[in-house]
Amino acid sequence: MTDVIIIGAGVTGAAVARYLSRYKADICVLERESDVCAGTTKANSAIVHAGHDAKPGTLKARFNIEGSEMMEDLSRELDIPYKRNGSLVVCHKGQDASGLNKLLEKGKANGVKDLRIIEKEELHRLEPSLSDDCESALFAPTGAIICPFTLNIALAENACTNGVRFYFNCEVTDVIFTGDHYKVSTGRGVFEAKAVVNAAGVYADVINNMVSEKKYHITPRKGQYLLLDRNTSPVSHTIFSLPTKMGKGVLVTPTVHGNTLIGPTAEDIPDKEDTSTTSNSLDYIRKSAAAAVDGIPFHEVITSFAGLRAHEDGGDFVIGEAADKPLFFNALGIESPGLTSAPAIGKYLSDLISERLGLPDNPKYDPDREGIVDPSSLSVEERNELIKRDPSYGQIICRCEMISEGEIKSAINRPLGARTLDGIKIRTRAGMGRCQAGFCTPKVMEILEKEAPMSIFDVTKSGGESHIVSGYNKRV
């Protein structure tokens, strides 16, 4: 009998697992995909929101502020990139500037620090590339950017090294409360546990509705994005426009890796698997972004993508123990600012679960995690010494991102190591550059074949049936 089953290995589920591993318990995570970070977390704006958008008194407001305040220390513990670049919500000529005042008052009520409205002269001094139509802005110095992949992976790796077990390709098909524990049916058999955490993203309503009489409904809200090549960003802050009822609008932001990210759209759709992009939506993104920022080099776009936000009909996070089912805990409706909120949600639920189960502290808990060595961050002397110790760090596999064989091998051999091309990509960025894996794929496949080890015919892009090689066309 397991103490706690967590359904979902996105950033929220991984955060619950990591913080719950502070306690002595038998914990496992069930994930329907072949890796962590395979759903909503892999396709979002990569923003640590300051917290001025959420309605005061909501769970979104509470966990946004708490998560934002936790993130910098967490980035040091988990050895992940984080940058407090600040954000600007701009008001264009002809727009009602009172919207900025409303955001300012909400932000103050939520506890956002150093929030203020700036006028045109200061605004354009901070961001010279802004359109002349930008008249004023709400400036949030505590806004930041982060890598969502690395955050998710780091939380999961740290949970794993602290004793949490992860089961992939393990889709939950039923959850039954027996009266004193839960039976969770999956494609890999039945798991039993005293407590269950539902962190299943856009499917969290489905999981909840298997168990509880209190029914929820999640609408997938699609957000499409454009990603530009490295060293292309005309802005240093995250640039928002005044929000609408559908969200925070199209943003323009640098990323922690030096790219420019533009988007998202906000389209409510019925299909929980539809991550397609459309020319009309991408054209809308270009037009909206160009209205706020001059000189965006759209010819430097290297890819487009879409993600699905889990929008619950009530409009707020649903977090906590179900009223009618003991020890069934929801982390449901986790849309924006879900990435920012994840650490705070993880800590809150883990503390609640430990109290309900009477869990003692884990004396072996280690909060620190060492990331994959980034040779580009080393001095010439340090890099030469690294290559002397392990020559594979001198073999460049991904030319666009300058990722070495040593980094790819590390990604495969770490806790919860990569077993797919996408797994390598989100851990090392091999394949994320200008050629979008056109050059490095064969080499990465060879490394996976050797290091995993696995047959070249078993190598997939993202698990399941996404095989790259189907057979021989010539034998020598």
Image: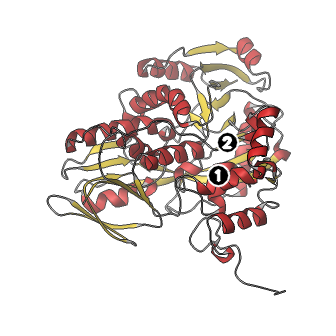
| x 53%, y 39%: residue | 369
Q: Is residue 321 above or below residue 91?
A: below
Q: Residues within 10 Å of mark 2 (few under 14, many from 20)?
A: some
The image position of residue 281, as x and y in percent, is 68, 52
Marks 2/1: CA distance? 8 Å
Q: Say which quarter of the image contains residue 418.
A: bottom right
Along the horizontal axis of the image, is 293 left or right of 269? right
Q: Position of residue 457 (x, y in %)?
A: 67, 77
Residue 161: where, in percent of width, then height? 46, 47
Mark number, residue 410: 1
Position of the N terminus, as image quadrant, is bottom left
Q: Which of the pair 464/209 is nearer the observer?
A: 464
Residue 176 in picture, x, y percent from top left: 24, 64
In the rendered image, the quadrant that contains the C terminus is bottom right
User: Eyeballing the image, is 118 above or below 332?
Assistant: above
Q: Residue at x 34, y 59 (%)?
A: 207
Query: In this view, which residue lies farthest toward the front?
Result: 389
Q: What amino acid type should be assigned to the residue bearing mark 2? A: Val
Q: Amino acid at mark 1?
A: Ser
Q: Nearer the viewer, residue 21 or 100?
A: 21
The answer to whether the residue labelled 2 contacts the one labelled 1, judged by CB atoms less than 8 Å apart, is yes
Residue at which label 2 appears: 373
